[in-house]
Amino acid sequence: MTYVAAPNRYESMTYRRVGQSGIKLPVVSLGLWHNFGDEHSRNTQRAILRRAFDLGVCHFDLANNYGPPYGSAEANFGAILRQDFLPYRDELFLSTKAGYDMWPGPYGEFGSRKYLLASLDQSLKRMGVDYVDVFYSHRPDPQTPLEETMGALDTAVRSGKALYAGISSYSAERTAEAARILTELGTPLFIHQPSYSMLNRWVEGGLLDTLQRVGAGCIAFSPLAQGMLTDKYLDGIPAGSRMAENSSLSRDLLTDQNLTHIRALNEIAAGRGQSLAQMALAWLAHDQRVTSVLVGASSVKQLEQNIAAMDNLEFSAQELAEIDKHAVEGGIDLWRAQTLS
């Protein structure tokens, strides 16, 4: 059936301005890191994207190597875009990234001008679009000069293949330097995408302040700590879970200490009438410095539950104090080596 977007799609979603730009993003955005590769049902993917847009989620976040296999998330999204969303392209805010390994050889990862611009061309072809709204340097490169990497982002914007430039997993210090270089080039830093959750609060050590100072937005990825901030692991490791399969989430992370904190946070959430996942998302979004929170979804129901977290963003001083006792470093920052390089 021909898809027609819900006429009331913008009525319930909250939108926040990205730094000092003219853009607003939904407070909840949809990330296509998991669940949009070839291993997953295209019909389910299509249903999730349709429902997201009907609920006001107009920002879809991708990367060149999302899948598996690499590139398949962009290709699958592109097919659904052609089926359903081409009439709404100007209402959509699309992002992609390059930085992690994508193809063999010395030019297939990190931050060289050659890799970034070649990757962007490939991403546009896979998605079937002329431009993306944001193109990110997906991770800092300790060997390539920052001027080269930021220069590539500037070129992407000046060529019209991207409208804005973003970075991901950069330290506060590198972010400040990247913003300085981009400003001098005439392409301001638009947004930073860091990992941020109740169990991974490194951005509070200076990055959020830096972004506010340079006028850039913040969109948090892995807000549920790869699933640890859900009810999935409260009673152990269920079969078929990422942790059970050691798929991007190690069993070693579910320590007794982490489990104690997670269970305590779950009790606080219950007192608020929210699931643990909903409270974890609301806790991030209650800070106005966080422009948007990136959620994943394997089903329409999960997507709806995540978006419902925005129904209650208010926290009492007592709730915040109790959360602070248990929202502590959990060793979940799988990107720390990149961030601090």
Image (tube, rainbow, N blue to C red):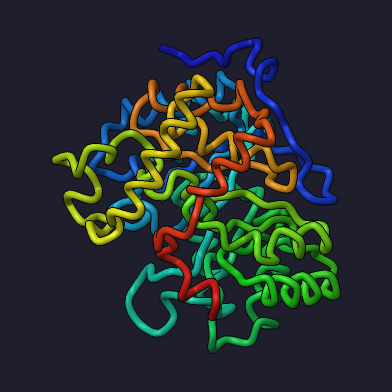
Relative image position of residue 99 (x, y in whole percent): 49, 69
> Is residue 174 visible in this depiction of the protein?
yes
- The residue under the point 40% across, 42% down is 229
The image quarter containing residue 204 is bottom right
> Is residue 69 visible in this depiction of the protein?
no
- The residue under the point 19% across, 44% down is 237
- The image shows residue 224, relative to residue 103, as above or below, that is above
Give left or right: position of 54 versus 228.
right
Relative image position of residue 147 (x, y in whole percent): 70, 82
Which one is in front, 31 or 319? 319
Give left or right: position of 331 versus 246.
right
Which one is in front, 166 or 19? 19
Quadrant occupied by the N terminus: top left
Relative image position of residue 123 (x, y in whole percent): 49, 55
Which one is in front, 317 or 313? 317
- The residue under the point 40% across, 63% down is 331
Figure label count: 0
The image quarter containing residue 136 is bottom right
Relative image position of residue 250 (x, y in whole percent): 26, 59
- The residue under the point 63% across, 87% down is 145
Point out the residue furthest to the left here: 239
Quadrant occupied by the C terminus: bottom right
